[in-house]
Each structure stands twice: as structure tokens, then as C-alpha cells.
Image (tube, grey):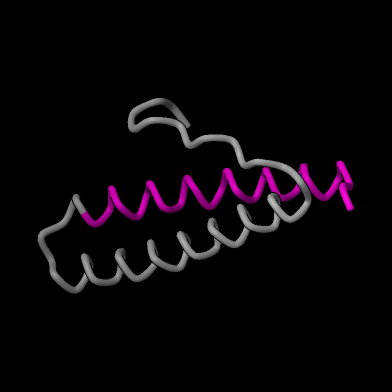
Amino acid sequence: MKDDGDIALLLGALALEREAVRRYVAHGAGTSDPRLVSHWESLRRNEAEHRDLLCAALRARGVEPPPEAPEGGGS
């Protein structure tokens, strides 16, 4: 079943998860404290799992998720 409202919500959530993954990668690269690196990596993995679940939910509704923006390609 393809509900445009649900798809819009899924796409919005996907954009947020992708941004979270990018931010946690950047945070991990920006510190030399191994505890913080571990913390950011754990959060990145959680957000990546959420991202993958949202992509699967879109595909289940017959919608191919949009490609991710290249690094440095904006928000």
C-alpha cells in the first residue's frame, strides 16, 4: 500500500538519519579521546541501522530511496 503521507514521513526521517550518520562520523574523526570515538561510533551504528530500516520500509511500499548526497555535497 502506497500512502503519500507515509512516504513523505519516511523520506523525512531517512534524511534525518543520514545526516545523523554523517555527523557522528565527523564527531569521531574530530577527537583523539578513544572513549568519545567509541561513543560516536556506537551512535553511528544505531543511526545506520535506523537508516537501513527506513530504506527497507520505503522499498516495501514500492519507493526506491533517493541516493545519498556525496560527501561535502550539502545538507
Left or right: 39 as drawn, with respect to 18: left
Q: Residue at x 86, y 45 (%)?
A: 5
Tell me if residue 68 comes above or below residue 73 in the rendering: below
Q: Outermost residue toward the left?
A: 32
Residue 10 vs residue 37: left or right?
right
Residue at image location 53% in from the left, 52% down from the top: 17
Q: Is residue 10 magenta?
A: yes
Q: In the rendering, at what x and y percent does residue 38 appear? A: 24, 71
Q: Is residue 2 magenta?
A: yes
How many labels were placed on the picture? Answer: 0
Which residue of the protein is positioned furthest toward the top in this rendering? 73
Q: Horizontally, is 17 left or right of 62 in the view?
A: left
Q: What segment is highlighted magenta in the picture?
A: 1-28
Across and down, in percent, residue 44 comes to 38, 61
Magenta segment main secondary structure: helix
Reply above or below: 27 against 72.
below
Q: Position of residue 64 (x, y in %)?
A: 65, 41
The spot of residue 12 in percent (x, y) is 67, 44
| Residue at figure coordinates x 38%, y 30% from the top left | 70
